[in-house]
Amino acid sequence: MNQLIKTVSILTSLWVIALYAQAQSVNITPERKRAIDSLALEKVRDLSKYISIIGDKATSMTESQRVIDRTMELFMEGAQMGVSSLNRKGVRYFPVRKYLERLRALNYQTVNIEWYNIQYISDLVQQPDGRFVGLITIYQRFEGVMEDGMRYVDVTKKDITVYVERKQQQIGGRLIGFWDVLLGDIKVTETKRS
Amino acid sequence: MRTHCFAFVCLWGLISVGSSRLCAQKIATGDITDLYAATKQLSQFIKRFNNEEDRQGVAYDPKSKFYREPEQRKQYLKLLFDEQSIVIPQNLRAGFIADITRSDSPVFLDFFGGDWFAEVKVTVTYNSKEEEAILFMVLEKAGQGYKWVIDRVYFRPYAPHIRSVTKNPNNFLHPQSHELGFMNLNRVFESPVTAEDYTSQSYHPPEQLQIFMYDLRRGAIKFITVNDTRFHFFQLRGWYFEVANFNRPGLNSGWLISNLVQLPPEQKSVMLNYIYRENR
């Protein structure tokens, strides 16, 4: 009996080690990369959509609060926005929630946020803990109109960090692998355009 | 002129083909030629440099005939220079492109290939006064992947106090000093500039990074913000170039080559010392 327990325990250990090794030696083929890119882009599209809703003056306080909560679910804990503008040196840092709340509170009569139909996706690079990290660049056009009719327009480049992790979940007794994508720090840069 | 024509043709191609839609949001209209043209990430700079992506910014399959195709690559390379720079003569640029695209032995940039690093200017307060520190960052292999680490720092307030000159052999504590209870140590500390002359052979002046970290720990330095990032490449034998970000209107923006030097390997250390602000 003892021998049986010993054998089962060794086999279990080997199985766990094999699973762990499999998880660590994940290879991202070009096809898999394309699939992960679409997943990441989907999150970025959600983020863009949420930002437009939060910035929209027609959105009620309750609704914008709900959307801010939804937006936060896209992000890793502790993610921050680094904002650089043309008339100020350096980067100003905001926690994501604070950034969204500031966007909601902007003192314009109307706000219109649009996104340019262009994006650039970097390669995914593995970091020390085994997760992959990439960057998606998109461009946003912001237009705010004050009560007196004064218009403020800017175009910002948003470099969005994307974390990709191979995870496993037990479904019906079987371990199913999947790629989990979360957004991280975002650098917002005001662009100079003609 | 030919370069600009090519850029124009390429960029119209980009716009007419377009890319996948950000369909869930309001799409901005208007000319976005400049946004396509901008080299948006350093990753894209490397991919354009090597001709590893198409005009829409989509990576080629390494098995594709377009991957690293030399003629297209030469055209891309011409677009990767800061057109407003006066420090890179046209003949040097042409020589560089010809050299790295030689049909018998073309050379390419490799993100993981080493021999390149980042220079990052940050603002800190030092003893409550705003100062600029320059951090030199390198990509280091760690665990299952890579990470950026601080390799060096240049901090102007330290510079006058760190000596890298040889010790003056006439400055020493004589071998009977112990009998005097080392009373002559006062001569060492009266002149801080020469105090290191009295240290052992194994003593080396501290690196600025060590002092910087010490000052950070004791609260004398506080980080404020990041101001500027640029990259220095020594990866292609015989050449050094710098890549900086240009945020400006037009088709020549984003990450571009801002300096190029033909550099025999034996002069690499001279260039490194210049970048590291050694002896300044």
Image (cartoon, grey):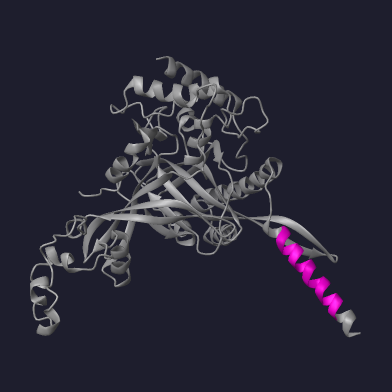
> Of A119 and B155, which appears nearest the observer?
B155
In the shown orientation, is residue A77 left or right of residue A34?
left
Chief SS of the magenta region:
helix
Determine the residue located farthest toward the front in the rendered image: B175
Q: Is residue B44 visible?
A: yes
> Of B105 and B230, which appears nearest the observer?
B105
Tell me, yes or no, whether the highlighted magenta stretch contains residue A12: yes
Determine the residue located farthest toward the right in the rendered image: A1
**What residue appears at the point 45 percent right and 33 percent down from the top-left corner?**
B38
**What residue appears at the point 34 percent right and 20 percent down from the top-left corner?**
B90
In the shown orientation, is residue B161 left or right of residue B6?
left
In the shown orientation, is residue B188 left or right of residue B256?
left
Quadrant where the image shows the N terminus of chain B:
top left
**What residue appears at the point 75 percent right and 63 percent down from the top-left corner?**
A19
Image location of residue B250, percent across then percent down: 39, 28
Q: Which residues are magenta?
A: A6-22
Tell me, yes or no, whether the highlighted magenta stretch contains residue A120: no
Q: Is residue A192 visible?
A: no
> Of B64 and A39, which appears nearest the observer?
B64
Above or below residue A152? Residue B147 is below
**What residue appears at the point 32 percent right and 27 percent down from the top-left corner?**
B88
